Each structure stands twice: as structure tokens, then as C-alpha cells.
Amino acid sequence: MKKTKLTEKNDNFRKLSIYIDNIIRKMESCDRQTRLFFDCYAIVIVRSGKLHIEENGQQILLRQHEAVIFEKGRMAVGKALQDEECWITLILFNGLGVPAMLEYLEIGDRERFNINGNVLSAELDAMIQTWEAGEYFRSSVMLQSLLLTVKNTEKANYQDSNLNEIYQYIQEHYAEPMDLNSLAQLYGASVSYFSRAFRQHFGTSPMTFVNEVRMHYARLFLTATEMKIQEIAGHCGFEKMEYFCYVFKKTEGCTPSQYRMNRRHADKIHQVEDIEPEDRVDVKL
């Protein structure tokens, strides 16, 4: 019976759930671009500087210690920023079990995470050194352990730290077109992971919060201005007035026009109640 070394890349080795194809260390200056084509899964890690990545029309900005994962078959262009050199590490990996592993870890395409911290940095450096020493099987196992550590610790902390930025972004850009996919992309995670993280952090779903912010301003415009209903819908980020009226009635229990009339009627009553008794004029009929 022929024995097979675990450090060799052969057919038996490629049946592992994950194996590292290559680890590349690259340095780019601000006046150069690097073409990133991934014929397998890849993790791009910024070791120093800042890296701007454009992939399929999408823009990603990575700072020192930040990383992003790309699915197989992606092609991107990276460029350093701010007149400085940018050191990056590319970890290229593959295997029959990679898709299932990433799904289990809830790590999606173009998802970002942070490798800063003593534990993660040590794991990363040890894995790279192990692979460069020719211990491919061991380094592949270490990569799985690294991704699991990211899932259990740093990833959650890194993603949650960005939730307040998304919260602020919604309040500042409520009048612009906004959907779950665009918010998840801005957050740097899959739609399912982003939705769960947002709900756990704020106690409501992302789009429910978007509509709450929009309804707040809709009530304000209806009460304090003479804007037409259709104008208010546009100012609150609704392209179709019908949908604006649907959301408004579902939230307030009445149509925008009814809400405006009710508020004006209530304001008149309050104005009469605020008149001092000596200022009132009794009219006898």
C-alpha cells in the first residue's frame, strides 16, 4: 500500500474541506494598480496603508488590519491611497467543502472583517509560516481555525461597531433610494447576517427602521408645511406615492391627508384652550 504525505498536493489532498493554494505578499504604491483575479476563494488583508478595491462596479475601502473575502471567479483592481505604500497579503484557498464552511460561518462574498488583536494576528502569522514551511495540511486546518475565531470574536465586534454608522447613515440619507441589499453592502456583510445583526442591536429590522425615520419626517412635513402629499412622498424617499400612502396608513392608521386634517383640527382646539378666560368673548345667540 502506497503511503501519501499530507504535505503533498495530490488528489487525496484536494478532497480536504479546505486547502491553501497560495499566499502572496504584495506591496503597491499610490501610483500603481494591482490586478486581482481569483480563480479560487481569496482573503485580501491590508497589513499597512489603505487599499481601494473596485470589483464589478462595487467600491471597497480597506484600512490597516482590515480584510475582505472574495468568492471564486471574482476579478478586482486594487490601488493604494494617500500617497503611501500599501502592504497586502493574499490568501488563496479552495476545496470541496469551502462553500459549506463559509455558509456555516455566515461569511459571504465581499464580506469584511478585522484581523487586529493579539490572538488573530498570532494565528494569521503562524498559519502563513506553517504554509511557507511546506506543511500544507496543517496550515489548511489553521485557516479553518482562524475563520472560526473571526466568527466567534473579532467579526462580531467589528461588524457591530459599524452598526451605529449605518444607523446614522439612514437618518442622514432617508430621502434617497435605499433598500436592504444596498444597506447590507454598505455594512459589508450578507443580507441575512446584516439583518440579524441590526435587529439584535436595535430591536427592529433595518427596513422597518428606515420607514420609521421616513414617517417621522412625513409627519413633520404634513404638520408644519403646505407641501403637497406627492412632494412629501418624494422628500421622504418614496418613489411611488401609492406605496408612501400604504406605509403611512399602516403606521399611523390613517391616510396622509386625514393625518394633516386631524392635526390641524387638534391645533385649533389647542389654540382655543390656550386663550385665557378674560380674553374670551362669549357670544349669545
Image (cartoon, rainbow, N blue to C red):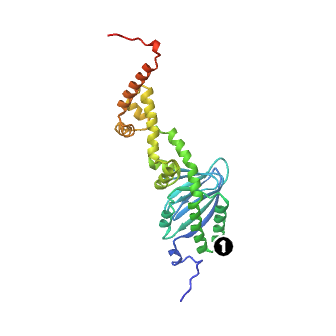
Residue that lies at the very extreme toward the top in this rendered image = 284
Q: Is residue 158 visible?
A: yes
Q: Is residue 14 left or right of residue 120?
A: left
Q: Quadrant of the C terminus?
A: top left
Q: Is residue 258 left or right of residue 78?
A: left
Q: Position of residue 11 (x, y in %)?
A: 51, 78
Reply above or below: 91 against 9.
above
Residue that lies at the very extreme toward the bottom in this rendered image = 1
Q: Position of residue 101 (x, y in %)?
A: 50, 66
Residue at figure coordinates x 46%, y 17% from the top left: 275
Judging depth in this view, the residue of 53 and 231 nearest the camera is 231
Reply above or below: 122 against 211.
below
Residue at figure coordinates x 49%, y 64% from the top left: 104
Judging depth in this view, the residue of 223 and 166 nearest the camera is 223
Reply above or below: 151 against 79.
below
Specify the amino acid type for callout 1: Ala
- Circle 1 — which element? loop
Q: Is residue 177 visible?
A: no
Q: Position of residue 120 (x, y in %)?
A: 64, 62
Judging depth in this view, the residue of 157 and 65 nearest the camera is 157
Q: Quadrant of residue 264?
A: top left
The residue labelled by disc 1 is 133
Q: Position of residue 138 (x, y in %)?
A: 60, 73
Are there few (<14), some (14-19), or many (20+) residues within 10 Å of tag 1? few
| Number of marks present in the image shown | 1
Reply above or below: 46 against 172.
below
